[in-house]
Amino acid sequence: MKRETAKTVRAFVIELAIYAVLVITYFFLVLNLLGQWLYELEIHRRYTYAALAILLIIGQAVLLESVTTFLIRLIRGRSE
Amino acid sequence: MFFPISGAHISPIYLAIVGFIIGVLGGFFGVGGSFIAGPALRLAGLDWNFAVGTDLAHIVGKSVVAVRRHRAMGNVDLRLGLIMAVGTIAGAELGAQAIQMLKRAGNVNLVVSIVSIVVYISISSFMIWESRKTLSQRGAIKGAKSKKDHSAFGPVTRAIQRLKIWPMISLPASGIRAISLWMILSVAFVGGLFSGFLGGGAGYIRMPSMVYVLGVPTHLAVGTDLFEIIISASYGTFSHAVKGNVDILIALVMHTGAAIGAQIGAISTQYFAGPKIRLAFVPLPLIGAAIVIYTMISGHKL
């Protein structure tokens, strides 16, 4: 039982570490590129910004859900 | 990190950690986590109107992740969720208009703070009474995975289900033979009103209401509430974004933490029985109330 718990905790830590690297890369690449453009959009075209905001958050959700599911399967095996 | 839309300087690590915690709680309890996210964003220096709108955007993303997990476990009543979305959107619009009115009057921060404290404490007080009473009844819980849910508030729930106000509809996925459509819409409308006014998906109102008023089993209430939150919070995000209350960059950063947290929370629900989930829920609104009280007393931009 303890061995099983240790295995789960180790897998989770590895998963978090990989995920953290991916997220930091994402911060620098995507957010820095999009920041100024979204700011301009928010000031001048509010409705377009509002629609884009929803699309961005749903798109990111689907993308990250796929990434986390892939990581869980990769590290813990297909049994998850 | 500087966020130009709201003009705030906030650490992305802080946002990701807050997102992660809210993700775990949201996946487990079926709530948006606004009772923590709103005050946490306030603590970071955002105005309430931005905290409310940005939190809604973040909730959309987090709920998408959690619902996919819950759906796989059979915890989502799509029919109920779609009906509730209609009532929630109407309520959310009214709540958002109230925020705009207070913004113009210049007292949005004080009013929202006081209302949120009262609401959070009331919910916790009621749920601690109900879940403790249910848990003290012998034989109330038979296995964590049971979808049959017992509640000390059961007689009131059954009385509500007996109200014959046309049109009556059945919800087989939730085990409800017949209930008035107006009861479902009323519960959703009240939830939406709080969602638009206090931010978030208002799961802290709707999840308990679905269990106690409509009689939906807790596990299904969690999953269905999250599904409904996707629709209503998307509408709320759009409405607040048009009014200039959403910093989508902050929401995207928060969501990076929430995405993994929501999966962990959703998976965890299968190990707990309904009344235990409800009892564990009790401290959450109290934490939110404590943060709001702290920021009011300490004068942290409130």
Image (cartoon, helix red, strand yellow):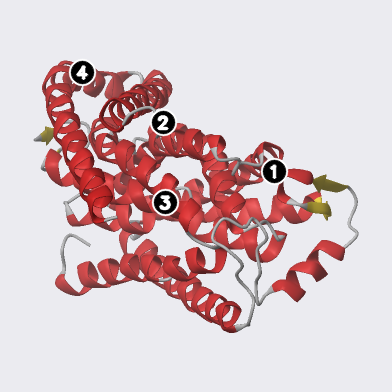
Can see residue B109?
Answer: yes
Q: Position of residue A47 (x, y in %)?
A: 42, 22
Q: Which mark is residue B268?
A: 3
Which type of secondary structure does the marked residue at label 4 adopt? helix
If you read the primary sequence from the N terminus, does the residue marked by circle 1 or circle 2 appear first? 1
Residue under label 4: A34
Can see residue B202?
Answer: no
Q: Gap in Å between the C-alphas at discs 1 and 4?
A: 37 Å
Q: Does the residue at mark 4 contact the one at mark 3 (Cβ under 8 Å)? A: no
In the rendered image, the vertical position of residue B237 relative to residue A54, given as above or below: below
Chain designation of label 4? A
Q: Callout 1: few (<14), some (14-19), or many (20+) C-alpha neighbours within 10 Å?
A: many
Residue drawn at the location 46% of the way across and 73% of the way down = B124
**Which sits in the foreground, B23 or A32?**
B23
Q: Gap in Å between the C-alphas at discs 1 and 3?
A: 23 Å
Horizontal placement of B105 versus B67: left or right? left
Residue drawn at the location 60% of the way across and 46% of the way down = B88
Which type of secondary structure does the marked residue at label 2 adopt? helix
Residue drawn at the location 32% of the way across and 57% of the way down = B36
Residue under label 2: B242
Three-letter residue code for mark 4: Leu
Horizontal placement of B227 versus B284: left or right? right
Q: Residue B80 carries which label?
A: 1
Q: Nearer the viewer, mark 1 or mark 3?
A: 3
